[in-house]
Amino acid sequence: MLSRNLKTLVNKNILYFTTSTSKSNKIYENAKEAVKDIPNGSKLLVGGFGLCGIPENLISAVRDTGVKDLTVVSNNAGVDDFGLGILLKSRQIKRMISSYVGENATFESQYLKGELEVELTPQGNLAERLRAGGAGIPAFYTSTGVGTVLVEEGGFPIKYANDGSGKVEIKSEPRPTQLYNGRKYCLEESITGDYALIKAWKADTRGNLVFRNTARNFNPPMATAAKITIAEVEEIVDAGEIKPDEVHVPGIYIQRIVKGPSFEKRIERLTVQKEKSGEAAVAAKPKDEAAAKRERIVRRAALEFEDGMYCNLGIGMPTLASNFIPKGIRIELQSENGLLGMGPFPKLGEHDADLINAGKETVTTIPGSSIFSSADSFAMIRGGHVDLTILGGMQVSGNGDLANWVIPGSMVKGPGGAMDLTSSGSRVVVIMEHTTKHGKPKILKNCTLPLTGKSCVNRIITELAVFDVVNGKLELIEIVDGQTVDDIKSKTEAEFTVSKNLKPLQQVEI
């Protein structure tokens, strides 16, 4: 029977009800105890983005149990010797459901050799499938992946034969589609799991969780979508020490809590500000031809920024455009891992393992920044709230199709958030070198690689030219000095028209 207790604190009467005098039965002594009942064949949902916010102690404990034939749902799979990479190395994982392979050579090798089943899914779809699963929604329609072999069409390899033949044994299934307001959408099924392994900064004894900086990422949606959620935390406090309106994940979703004994918090890409010995010295530093090409592309891309824009910049060269924001222009940079208002790289010694961008690089915040989960991040993107997306490309077709995420049988990185960004309805600018390193065109009549998005590109910027995609056709609007239209035609497979107002290739002033 419920007992009624009256407590007086600073002349305030507080009524509360309890069925127990113990603090909590959710707190476990260590990670080993918390995971020891996970059976073979379980489906695990594992939080984190790259190596940021991963439950490193729980992952090690799962490895030590020797449990096998796991299906693991996680945005990434760690690196070869840390994070989920150690479960791949010990061959305890049968199938990965992920968005981005990244730099994990073990992951890529096992997949291509037919030793691992890999179900790749767009990053925003992954986040929403988990959020929907936790909310009891069995499926939903999304425009992400329409027109792609990975989502709508199906047939993308999940498992290759392990005899080296390259034969595909398991393929992805095509998705049902539906038209809404004249636009096509694909049906995606939600994801739930047997256990979720997540990482938070702080928990109270009731299981309420608080995350720190961008270590939040995929952890909240993972927490809600499992039958049993195990949270690894850095600190456990008494109930009441976390204010109710400061709770990021309520305790109703958390069944087990473990305080980690230590945390390596390995940084995947430590990126800091370069020390300058004077502007003149920097300006005088010679650039090789490749660096000069990249800077020319990036300085042109920076002219796409307009005051007040919310922008998402892809990994690599697109990110560099933020170094050349024109004077008088203020933009907000959005990062898929849950950061709006991204600042510059930190100074050496001021970096924070819990604060990274979507490229896994250490970053800073600025006044007015906000941090949120990956599910909320892609709600912003999918909802059309991001004004401009700048991405890299492997191939772009004459009608604006983009391919930039995989070379079948050779390079497997995963789609990441690119499919979500290109289907969001925001303006999409692709920046890339005009030809491959072998001199072959990258602007083609039709893409030969699997598509990222169909008819999604608005503008193409290379070191030689700028094209607009107008009504499904290319129009040359800028050309670099020293090149003729015929020169551009010889390096471009796709047909294009020439603008009546053709200009020299523009460059932001620095």
Image: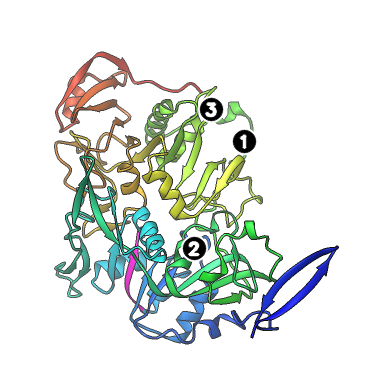
The x and y percentages for residue 224 are: 46, 67
Q: Is residue 174 shown above or below 22?
A: above
User: Quarter holding the N terminus?
Assistant: bottom right
The residue beneath circle 3 is: 284
Q: Residues within 10 Å of mark 1 (few under 14, many from 20)?
A: few
Which label's residue is closer to the chain start, 2 or 3? 2
* Residue at the image position 68 percent from the left and 63 percent from the top: 242
Q: Give the CA separation, mark 3 to mark 1.
A: 12 Å
The x and y percentages for residue 127 are: 39, 58
Is residue 467 visible from the viewing direction of this image?
A: yes
Q: Is residue 364 shown above or below 44?
A: above
Residue bounds of the magenta highlight? 93-100
The residue beneath circle 2 is: 219
Residue 103 placement: quadrant: bottom left
Looking at the rendered structure, the number of numbered marks drawn on it comes to 3
Residue 313 placement: quadrant: top left
Give the amino acid type for the residue marked by disc 2 in the picture: Asn
The residue beneath circle 1 is: 276
Badge 2 element:
helix
The answer to whether residue 402 is left or right of residue 373 is left
In this rendering, the label closer to the viewer, 2 or 3: 2
Is residue 102 visible from the viewing direction of this image?
A: no
* Residue at the image position 47 percent from the left and 80 percent from the top: 62
Instruction: In the displayed orientation, state which residue is furthest to the top.
Output: 500
The answer to whether residue 148 is left or right of residue 52 is left
- Majority secondary structure in the magenta region: strand
In this rendering, the label closer to the viewer, 3 or 1: 1
Q: Is residue 296 shown above or below 272?
A: above
Comparing 461 with 232, the one in front is 232
Badge 1 element:
loop
